[in-house]
Each structure stands twice: as structure tokens, then as C-alpha cells.
């Protein structure tokens, strides 16, 4: 009888061993992790560009508004050039290619009921120009804003941690005589004066206590109270500590604290200056430096101004 050969045909391929399979799987896992990290970096860079472009457009709107109104800017909340009371963002809508929403607001706010119903409608109107993709509290719907304006320039807006009822300051029908002069009042020059910056659209805390605070670009009416939570203002008794506390760097949704400032990325936050420049500011910049660029009507030391964009 003829014996069968035990040799493997040269055309027959041997299978992978278990060790070889594990090595291949490990390599694929490493490559996947590298790809995920790269994709996240690309997404964050794109979101940074989107947010900086929004601020740049807001800065251009501010400049164009001043140019067409004899150097004057609208208040954070109040009348402007004979209009009905509105937030500064509402007054800037025509310069952000949102004329229809501006006309709708002004028409409704001119009714006997006053601006309350018009403000309520803006709370439901999502505008991409006021939203940063890096802001995790930005739900992609509703009328919240990821940006806050300097209350020294845009007076009467509620700054961080402030819940003053604007209706108690003065009736909404009275003009708060607070128009800032873009062409005259920047004591440190336009390049060293803050217009606005990123801030979480919704905060789950206020000074450490659970208190849901939403920042609506059109303001907010709660019962008989009126708020314009669209501002950032000077810090009382500033020190050399970081402007953004560690817990407020990339805070998870509902973990931002309205009493503090936020940075949407580890690289810091974006801010727009009065000359239209948009800059990335380190989260470690100190409170005294922030006050220097925020207090636009007060001359500040050049060493402090220089540290803002260092």
C-alpha cells in the first residue's frame, strides 16, 4: 500500500497562530486610539475657528454700529437711538445680517405690553452666531449665547454672578442714558479694550450653590423681573490668581459656575477687542490683567495690558 505524504503542499497556506492574532489586534487598537485622538484635535480646532469667527463678526457688528450711529454703541439693555428697550445683542442684529428678527422684536416690543413678549420669543430663537461649538452647555436649540459683552462698554447688562432685576433699576420704557462712545472713550486704546468673550451659555451653579442660570441673547423675563445675563464685568478686589479656576476649564454640562469665567478648551478662551482682533487668552491670565482690559474708561498700567495677549 502506498503511504500518504505528511508534507504540506507549498500552495497550502498555514493559519495564524494565537499570538500572531493578538499582536495584530493590539496594533489595530493602538492605531484606532491614535486616530480617535487626531480626530478629536481636528474637531476642536474646527470648533475654535467657528467660535473665533463668531466673535470676529460680533466685533465687526460693534464697529459698524458705532460708525453708523455717530460713534455710539447700544446699552447692554435699554433704548438705543429712539428704539424700544432691548439687549445689546438685539440692537446689533441688523449688523449681523439678522434684520428680520430685529424688525420682529421691535414691532412686538412696541405694543402696549412692552418688550416682555418680544424678549420671550427671542428665548426660543437659536442663532448660530451666538453659539460656540466648544461650549458643552450649548444644546443646539433655544436662544442662549456662548458669548458675553463687557458691561463697562455695554452698561446695564448683568455681569457674572449678578441677578439684579433691571425692572427695579428703571422702568423698561425709560432710556438708560448709557450709550458708550466707541470713538472717544477707550482710555487704553481700542487694541487694549475688551468688547466680549466666551462664557458658558448655561451654568448649573452660582457661587458654588446649585442655581441654573441661562444666558439668553435677547434677555429674559421671569415673572415681573427682567434680566440681561449677557455681560462680564470688572472683578471686585482682583488678585493675581488665575481668571479661570481649574474646575471651570472645559466644565461638563451643568457644572459651569456663573460667578466665574470659563475656558472651553485647555488652551484658554477667545476674546474680541475693540479694534476687531480676536485673540486666544490663557486661562491662567490673572484677575488684575482682566480688569485692566475690561475697565475701558480707566487708564491701566502697560504691564497689565501687555499680559492679556502675552
Image (cartoon, rainbow, N blue to C red):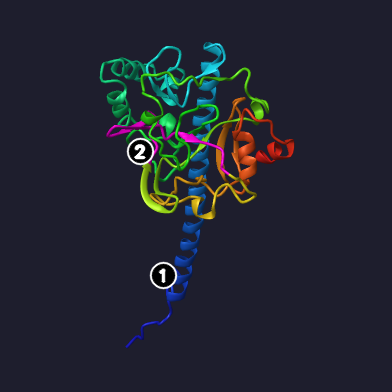
Point out which mark residue 78 bears.
none
Front in this rendered view, residue 51 or 259: 259
Residue at screen point 66% across, 28% down: 191
Segment tinted magenta in the rendering: 214-236
x, y percent for residue 179:
51, 19
Would residue 260 be found to the left or right of residue 310 on screen? left
The quadrant of the rendering that contains the N terminus is bottom left
x, y percent for residue 283:
58, 47
Q: Which residue has dot 2 on it?
A: 140
Point out which mark residue 12 bears.
1
* Observer able to see residue 127: no
Residue at screen point 26% across, 20% down: 113
Element under disc 1: loop
Whole-angstrom CA distance, mark 1 to mark 2, is 58 Å
Rendering quarter of residue 281? top right
Front in this rendered view, residue 205 or 37: 205
Residue 221 on the magenta segment: yes
x, y percent for residue 31:
50, 58
Q: Earlier in the sequence, mark 1 or mark 2?
A: 1
x, y percent for residue 289:
65, 41
Would residue 38 be found to the left or right of residue 293 on screen? left
Q: Main secondary structure of the magenta part?
A: loop
Element under disc 2: loop
Residue 144 on the magenta segment: no
The residue carrying pointer 1 sits among few (fewer than 14), some (14 to 19) or many (20 or more) residues within 10 Å by Cα, namely few
Amino acid at each position: 500500500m502506498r503511504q500518504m505524504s505528511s508534507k504540506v503542499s507549498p500552495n497550502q497556506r498555514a493559519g495564524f497562530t494565537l499570538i500572531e492574532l493578538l499582536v495584530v489586534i493590539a496594533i489595530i487598537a493602538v492605531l484606532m486610539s491614535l486616530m480617535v485622538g487626531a480626530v478629536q484635535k481636528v474637531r476642536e480646532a474646527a470648533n475654535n475657528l467657528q467660535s473665533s469667527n463668531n466673535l470676529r463678526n460680533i466685533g465687526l457688528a460693534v464697529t459698524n454700529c458705532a460708525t453708523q450711529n455717530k460713534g455710539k454703541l447700544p446699552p447692554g439693555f435699554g433704548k438705543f437711538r429712539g428704539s424700544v428697550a432691548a439687549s445689546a445683542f438685539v440692537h446689533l442684529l441688523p449688523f449681523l445680517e439678522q434684520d428680520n428678527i430685529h424688525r420682529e422684536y421691535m414691532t412686538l416690543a412696541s405694543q402696549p405690553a412692552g418688550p416682555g413678549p418680544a424678549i420671550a420669543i427671542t428665548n426660543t430663537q437659536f442663532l448660530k452666531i451666538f453659539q460656540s461649538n466648544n461650549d458643552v452647555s450649548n444644546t443646539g436649540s433655544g436662544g442662549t449665547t456662548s458669548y458675553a459683552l463687557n458691561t463697562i462698554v455695554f452698561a446695564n447688562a448683568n455681569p457674572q454672578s449678578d441677578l439684579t432685576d433691571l425692572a427695579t433699576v428703571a422702568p423698561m420704557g425709560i432710556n438708560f442714558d448709557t450709550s458708550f462712545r466707541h470713538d472717544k472713550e477707550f482710555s487704553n486704546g481700542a487694541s487694549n479694550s475688551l468688547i466680549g468673550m466666551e462664557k458658558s451659555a448655561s451654568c448649573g451653579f452660582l457661587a458654588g450653590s446649585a442655581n441654573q442660570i441661562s444666558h439668553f441673547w435677547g434677555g429674559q423675563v421671569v415673572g415681573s423681573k427682567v434680566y440681561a445675563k449677557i455681560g462680564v464685568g470688572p472683578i471686585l478686589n482682583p488678585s493675581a490668581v488665575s481668571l479661570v479656576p481649574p474646575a471651570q476649564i472645559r466644565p461638563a454640562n451643568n457644572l459651569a459656575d456663573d460667578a466665574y469665567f470659563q475656558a472651553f478648551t485647555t488652551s484658554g478662551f477667545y476674546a474680541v477687542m475693540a479694534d476687531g482682533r480676536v485673540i486666544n487668552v490663557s486661562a491662567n491670565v490673572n484677575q488684575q490683567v482682566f480688569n485692566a482690559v475690561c475697565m475701558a474708561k480707566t487708564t491701566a498700567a502697560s504691564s497689565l495690558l501687555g499680559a492679556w495677549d502675552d
